[in-house]
Amino acid sequence: MRLFITVAVVIILDQLSKFYITSTLEIGQSVTVVDNFLYITYVRNPGAAFGVLPYQTVFLIVITVIVAVLVFYFYRILSDDHKWLRIGLALQLGGALGNLIDRIGGGYVIDFIDVTVWPPVFNLADAAIVIGIGIFLIAFLRDPDLKGERSKSNVS
């Protein structure tokens, strides 16, 4: 149940933010939030991260579906004891599905968070994916059960 709540919250926040951006800004328009640091800039990204594979919409949809199925599978096989691993996976799944909705609907992803220290413009779904990966990696490296499994496998 937590998976669905987390995924739903990510998707709702992502889609509402994108709806707001597309309703209030023109493509390419930028609004200063913090001068010389943070802007809201409406762009359409027809590719993957960093604009890689532009206009390969069908391929990107297929890859996203495969990744979403794998994330869901790994979420399901993890016990409730691995709370942070599961949270990380849920955030990744929510972000992937948020961007998938864009791709299916228009063939591109709506991006708008423009931080000058990080060149690509991104969105809340992208942020959820990156935060989810970070949480997952930290939890994975700190999980004593998984450390024990890794140590045993290294001995053999």
Image (tube, grey):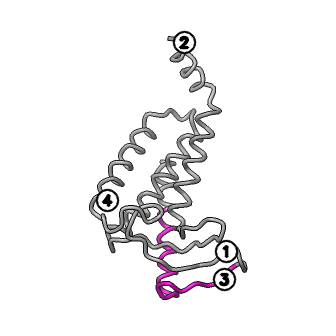
CA gap, disc 3 and disc 1: 7 Å
Q: Is residue 47 left or right of residue 14?
A: left
Label 4 vs label 2, nearer the camera: 2
Q: What residue lies at 58% left-to-right and 18% top-to-bottom?
A: 151
**Circle 4 crowding by C-alpha within 10 Å: few under 14, some 14–19, many from 20:** some
Give the vertical position of 56 relative to 76 (above or below): below
Q: State which region is magenta.
A: 11-33
Q: Amino acid at mark 4?
A: Ile
Q: Amino acid at mark 3?
A: Thr
**Circle 3 crowding by C-alpha within 10 Å: few under 14, some 14–19, many from 20:** few
Q: Are marks 3 and 1 in contact (CB under 8 Å)?
A: yes
Report the predominant secondary structure element of the magenta stretch.
helix
CA gap, disc 4 and disc 2: 40 Å
Judging by the rendered image, the residue that carries numbered circle 1 is 38
Q: Amino acid at mark 1?
A: Leu
- Secondary structure under the numbered disc 4 in the rendered image: helix
- Secondary structure under the numbered disc 1 in the rendered image: strand
CA gap, disc 4 and disc 3: 32 Å
Give the vertical position of 2 relative to 55 (above or below): above
- Secondary structure under the numbered disc 2 in the rendered image: helix
The image's mark for residue 155 is 2
**Circle 2 crowding by C-alpha within 10 Å: few under 14, some 14–19, many from 20:** few
Judging by the rendered image, the residue that carries numbered circle 3 is 32
Judging by the rendered image, the residue that carries numbered circle 4 is 61
Outermost residue, left side: 58
